[in-house]
Structures are given as structure tokens and as C-alpha cells.
Image (tube, grey):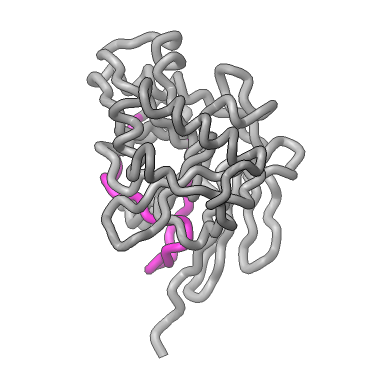
Amino acid sequence: MKLASYADGSRDGHLVVVSRDLTQAHYASGIATRLQQVLDDWGFIAPQLQDLAVQLNHGKLRHAFPFEPEKCMAPLPRPHGWAVVGADGSVRREAGQLLGAGMPLRAAAACEPALMAIAGDLHAASDTAAALDALRLLGLAVDWRLDSELLATHAAPLLVTPDELGEAWTGVRLQARLVALHNGSKLEPRDVVAAPADALVRLTRLRAQRTGQLAGVALGALDVALAPGDSLRLDLKSTDGQTSLFGAIDLDLTPPAA
């Protein structure tokens, strides 16, 4: 299933289920209103959301409406933590708030995409099998850094259960294509492989993990020079470049003041 949080004036947004083709959505109000509720009681609530997703995908929900990514906040705006694991095993602990995919960036910064993973509770020193069993949702996030200082983290609008990713998910790792548009011009696509369970295991070597904490797998910095007034669109797609897995991060760099 695919989940998003529509902005509604609250700090956490309102949970919606999104169709497989990203065209339709339905409020999850009768089941849960916030994603953290789902994570806290996954075994009971997730099957109900899955049933709703099946009905939505089959066109059986009378109150479905067109999905509008621009209305989304980050799917989990206030996680309990956000840590990114680099290719060398290093861990960066980041800010605890995620911004929606369309929130403007206030300053030119280095762009560092990451596969984002949410798991259930994990004991300290958990192994890969336990991490895979606890894995709940995957998404896309981007850290923005200026002189190594974190300025902001943006999240793509959707969090997705691994089974929804089709051939992009091998059961252990994600195989995808990172596609970027800078001021409307396509940059060279990058094929990426990311193993979220390995990142979760690495984090449990430091401490136990609780549901609502986010683990990131660094996908390598994007080599692009941004300037005020620029636009940048980032999307993780299936390896053929045709299917968006988590929706796009589509933002503008605030232009200089007049």
C-alpha cells in the first residue's frame, strides 16, 4: 500500500491511502488519522489500510478523489529520529523534522538523496532477518547541506510497503533509478542499489530502535550546482525509468529578494 499525509492545518497532517498508479486517494479517517498511529499499532491497523488500498485500486470506493501531491506534507512530519548510514558505515544523526516535497529551499546547498526506511521496534544488535521482519515502509528523502551543516530534509510524498514496489524490491534491497531535472533539463540518471535492513542493523549496533525512527541509506550526493531561482525535481523510479516509486520531490530555490 501507498500512504501519504495531506496538509490539514495540523502538525501531522491527515492520513490518506493512495492508489497504485498515484491517480486516486481516500482518507483513512475511519481507521487512523495519522501515520504514527499506524506505526504504533501496525499489526491491527495495517491490514485494515491494506483492505482499503485494495478497494481503492479496484475503483470500489465511492468517496475516492484525485490524488494531488502538492497537498502533501512529509508523510511522517515529526519522526522520533532521522539517521543516515553512508556507504562506509558512518552514521549521521539529523534533524527530527521532515519537510514536504514542495516546500521551498531557502539557500543553495549540496543535495544528498537517501532511501528512507521505517521499521517497528528493534532490539539493540538486531540481525538482518529481524530488521527485514520489522521493516514497514520505504520512501525517498533528501538532505540539504551547506558547509557540512544540515539546512533541511525534504521527503517525497509517499511511504510504500516493500511488497508494493514490484520488481524494484528483491526482498532484501531496492534496485531503482534516480532521475533528476534541474531547471527542467534532465541530468544523467543514476542506477542505485540500497539495502535498508543493513542500515537498520548498523543503527541497532548503537542503540535499540523504536517505531517512528527513520533510517536512511545514502544514495550519493547529487552533482548539481544550484543558484537562487533554480528548480530541482528528484524521483526514484523503477529501473526502466517509467514508474515513480515514492512520488517526486519537486522544489524551488527561493529567488533573491527584489
Near-viewer residue (199 or 48):
48
**Quarter where residue 118 is shown:** top left
**Quarter where residue 127 is shown:** top left
| Residue farthest bottom in this picture | 258
Above-or-below relation of 138 to 109 = above
- The residue depicted at 55 percent of the width and 36 percent of the height is 53
Q: Where is residue 102 in the image (x, y as percent from the top left)?
A: 47, 62
Q: Position of residue 158 (x, y in %)?
A: 50, 44
Near-viewer residue (184 or 150):
184
How many numbered circles are shown? 0
Quadrant showing the C terminus: bottom left
Q: Position of residue 77 (x, y in %)?
A: 33, 48
Q: In this view, does 37 lie to the left or right of 73?
A: left
- The residue depicted at 56 percent of the width and 56 percent of the height is 65
**Quarter where residue 254 is shown:** bottom left
Q: Where is residue 100 in the image (x, y as percent from the top left)?
A: 42, 56
Near-viewer residue (226 or 84):
84
Residue 142 can be seen in this image: no
Q: In this view, does 9 lie to the left or right of 200?
A: left
Which span of residues is magenta-colored?
91-115
| Residue farthest front in this picture | 62
- The residue depicted at 63 percent of the width and 39 percent of the height is 57
Residue 129 can be seen in this image: yes
Above-or-below relation of 191 to 234 = above
Quadrant showing the N terminus: top right
- The residue depicted at 55 percent of the width and 67 percent of the height is 231
Q: What kind of secondary structure does the magenta stretch mostly adopt?
A: loop
